[in-house]
Image: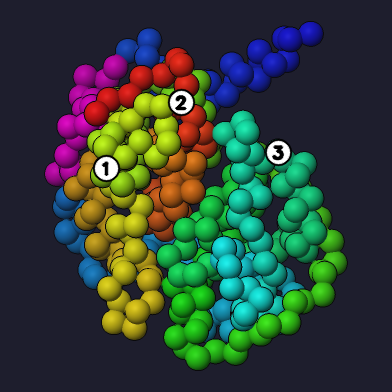
Amino acid sequence: MKKPVVMITLLALAIVSAACGSKDAAKPAASTPATTAAAKPEAAAASASIKATDPYPNAQLLADVKWTEEHLKDAKVKILDARAKGYEQGHIPGALSLNSGLLKDAANNTIVAKDKFTELFQNLGVSSDTTVLIYDEGNSLNAARVFYALEYYGHKDHVKILNGGYAAWAAASKEVSTDTPAAPAKGNFAAAPNDKLITTKEQLKALDIQQCTLLDVRSAKEFSGDDLRGNQKGGHIDKAVNREWSDAIDANAKDGVPVFKSYLDLTKAFEQTGVDKDKSKTVIPYCQTNIRGAHTYFTLRLLGYTDIRPYEGAFAEWGNAADTTVVK
């Protein structure tokens, strides 16, 4: 009776192999390993044509304070507060508190099962036609984790992040509430996993990395192995390039609100790392538990990248597994 499980596993491997290729597949003659990849001439030319004032290709994934204020009483919008603390002391009126940690099955290094995910978001009043607006303290780390989980489970293009989070709302001196909203009517959201938005350890071991860009978004010390972060093995996955997730945030904004950097700045930064928009390559971000990886997933979505598949097990799995290797 194990045949269905085998078929599902083979199907999952085939999905990623179709994007990245398997190790046994013939390698394209012009392939360049991710460790030595440089910005392609055409990519550099494309970034040179971008103005600092140009909007992000997927600018609709970000909301500002004005949009948020205009939709406070919109029945088709659910606002979720993903901050780790501070909700009781003040939040955006009508926002519901959500612990982003509930989205992880830490025991199995996976995203929480679809039935639990469905129940959680139905109880938050989310339906198939609901626009979900998420905010956190400001750097969008927890907000992006919720964003990624919702897109993975089928709510793609119906989720937004408040740029600058609660810090932006407070800086604009907008109304703050300490009231806990009444439990919303149960929504009809039904989680449907999209295997094209995720990567597993088995898939990573099977694919041809030359046809992918493996992007380590941890700190430089974690990447080098100087910071073990509690893992048995330190370093990074072979062929990965490193750009820390937080580089996407302008932490020195004049008003003190940590917002995403401009389209031009972000595009240049990723191209310099070797992460361009080559449609033949899948980008696989990873960190320790796919919280920072999810943030980079959102950043790349914002920039218009079309094939992003975070490694959900991340280094918590890879750096502690007996059947994996790391490099320093």
Q: CA distance from mark 2 to mark 3?
A: 22 Å
- What amino acid is at disc 2? Asn
Residue drawn at point x = 72 percent, y = 9 percent: 3
Against 320, residue 305 (above or below) is below
Q: Quadrant of the C terminus?
A: top left
Whichever of labels 2 and 3 marks the residue nearer the N terminus, that label is 3
- Magenta range is 27-41
Q: Which residue is mark 3?
A: 113
- What amino acid is at disc 3? Ala
Q: CA distance from mark 1 to mark 3?
A: 32 Å
Q: Quadrant of the N terminus?
A: top right
Whichever of labels 1 and 2 marks the residue nearer the N terminus, that label is 1
Lateral position of residue 164 relative to residue 178, left or right: left
Q: In terms of secondary structure, what is the magenta stretch mainly? A: loop
Residue drawn at point x = 61 percent, y = 51 percent: 101
Q: CA distance from mark 1 to mark 2?
A: 18 Å
- Mark nearest the camera among 1 and 3 is 1
User: Circles 2 and 3: CB distance less than 8 Å?
Assistant: no
